[in-house]
Each structure stands twice: as structure tokens, then as C-alpha cells.
Amino acid sequence: MAVSHAKNGSLPLMNLVRTTAFPIINQLHLEEKLLRTSSENWCIINDGTVDSAIVMGVSGKLSDLVETRSVLRDRIPVVRRFSGGGTVVVGKGTIFVTFICNKDAVPGLQPYPCPIMSWTARLYAKALHDVVDFSLRENDYVFGDRKFGGNAQSITRARWLHHTSFLWDYDARNMRYLKHPPRAPKYRSSRRHEEFLCPMKGFLSSSSDFVDRTVASIEDHFSLRQVELGAVTDSPAAAGYTQSTKLLTEEELKASVESETEV
């Protein structure tokens, strides 16, 4: 595994993988493998994914969340990830940041959804210290009352994962593939996607600036060791490991359309 030396031996070690345009399904496969088969702490930062895709949480109901007819017509990939969280459209303008940690990696942090969410919010608050009106509202990162970051989590017996999709920029036309979710945060107030979402590009100079700020904030908590993406993707998974993140098939999408028609 090709690495650089860790900077601060007094802090817990975290492997840092920085990449660009890594396909989101490959990233989710990697995240799941590291959560379930690694015993080390990881941060994966991916600036953009190759093609637009829809990503659903593990328990989301397709017919409630996605305009399946439009997705079939336009051949938009739909991925069901292994972790919880909402449904998002991702693309070249999405920045992904994922923490995969042992439960004792952050001193005093209780390994439950709300404490993990609060810890990451403090980390991003430092990275965005000069940006007005950043906050955590319910389970979203917002500027004022407009969302720019959505989160997903997975917690196992010994480890936890926190994944964020940041909207550096997005194509508003892609939002037509999403339905208004049955369960939405209260602060959304029934607003349409274009009234509810906010790209980050109007607040920072570049996506790489945000990534650099995030890395600097992480260094308050971890000693970082750079790891090349290929070294991680090429490493074999543990014996008996079964991948649960999957690309939905055309048959599954058509079945959703048929179920809506029957109703």
C-alpha cells in the first residue's frame, strides 16, 4: 500500500484517500468493504462522479421516491446503497466525503447517529468558519434554510460510517427524477427541489478549496496518512464478505412502474 508518513503520531491514525471522478457505485462498494472488513480508520474524499446517478438508502421505497418512468426513459442509473439516509441525484458537481471509523477513534464520541452527526457538523463548521449561516438542521447541512449537504450513516458493532454528498453544483433538470419524499425535514416546508437546495459554488472559490479546508479540519482529530485509491480498490475483501450495495436492474425499475399503475 503506497502511503506517505503520518504527520502527528499523538493522534489516532486515519487513512486518507483523495480522488476525482470515481464512479459513485464503486465508491459505495469500497466504503462498504472498508466498513465491514477493515479495522483501520478511513476518510474517502471524491470530487465528482463520472455520470449522473440516483442513490437511494437501504430501506427507501422506489415508487415513493423516484420518477421511475423518466429514469427508465433517460437510462439514469439507480443505486441502492448499504447505508441509511435519503435519496439524492449525484453527478460531476457532487463532492463526497466519507468517514469510516472504529468506535473508539474519537474520544468521548458515542457511536450513535445524533452524536456522530454533531461531531461531523463541528468539523465542517471549522472548515466553513468564514461562510455565513452554515448549520446542521435536522440531518442536513445548510446555508440558512437551504440544503447543500445530505448524509447517510451505517453503524456496526465495532465501527461507524458517515457519508456526505455535498452539492458543489448540480443540474436542476436532474431534480425532476426525484419525487417529493413522504418523509421530509420540517424546515423544507414543502418547497420544491430548486427552492430547497443550494449549490456551494457561490460560497467558496473552488471545490478543491473546500476539500483542502476539510482535510485541515480533520487533522485536528487524526494523524492523516495518504493512501492511493488503487492500493485500496485492488486489495481483496475478507473471506465470506458479501456486497449489498447494488445497481437496480431494468426489471426492478419496470416492476416499480407496474406497481404504481396497479395502484
Image (cartoon, rainbow, N blue to C red):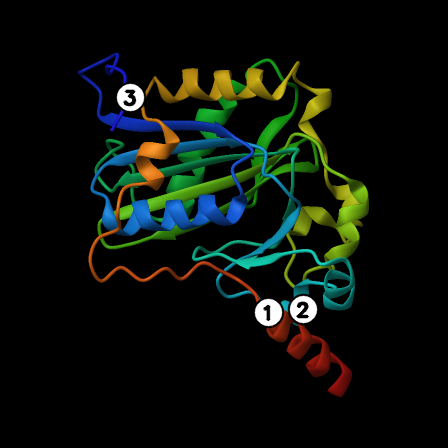
The correct choice, above or below, for 221 with respect to 262 in the image is: above
Instruction: Write down the residue under mark 3.
Output: 225
Question: Residue 142's spot in the image, x, y percent?
Answer: 63, 34
**Seen in the image, is 123 located left or right of residue 7?**
right
**Seen in the image, is 236 located left or right of residue 69?**
left
Q: Camera-side residue: 191 or 44? A: 44
- How crowded pointer 1 is (Cα within 10 Å; few <14, some 14-19, many 20+) is rated as few
- How crowded pointer 3 is (Cα within 10 Å; few <14, some 14-19, many 20+) is rated as many
- How crowded pointer 2 is (Cα within 10 Å; few <14, some 14-19, many 20+) is rated as some
Q: Are marks 2 and 1 in contact (CB under 8 Å)?
A: yes
Label 1, secondary structure: give it: loop
Q: Camera-side residue: 24 or 153? A: 24
For the residue marked with disc 3, what is the amino acid? Arg
Query: Within the image, what quadrant is residue 217 found in?
Result: top left
Is there any visible trace of residue 96 in the rendered image? Answer: yes
Which one is in front in this view, the residue at disc 2 or the one at disc 3? 3
Tell me the quarter of the image containing the N terminus: top left
**Seen in the image, is 69 located left or right of residue 20?**
right
The correct choice, above or below, for 56 with respect to 52 in the image is: below
Instruction: Write down the residue under mark 1.
Output: 61
For the residue marked with disc 2, what is the amino acid? Asp
* Mark 2 to mark 1 CA distance (whole Å): 5 Å
The correct choice, above or below, for 56 with respect to 231 in the image is: below
Question: Residue 160's spot in the image, x, y percent?
Answer: 32, 46
* Mark 1 to mark 3 CA distance (whole Å): 39 Å
Earlier along the polypeptide chain: callout 1 or callout 3?
1
Which one is in front in this view, the residue at disc 1 or the one at disc 3? 3
The correct choice, above or below, for 246 with respect to 138 in the image is: below
Earlier along the polypeptide chain: callout 2 or callout 3?
2
**Residue drawn at 71 percent across, 59 percent down:** 75
Question: Residue 230's spot in the image, x, y percent?
Answer: 36, 33
Which numbered dot is residue 64? 2
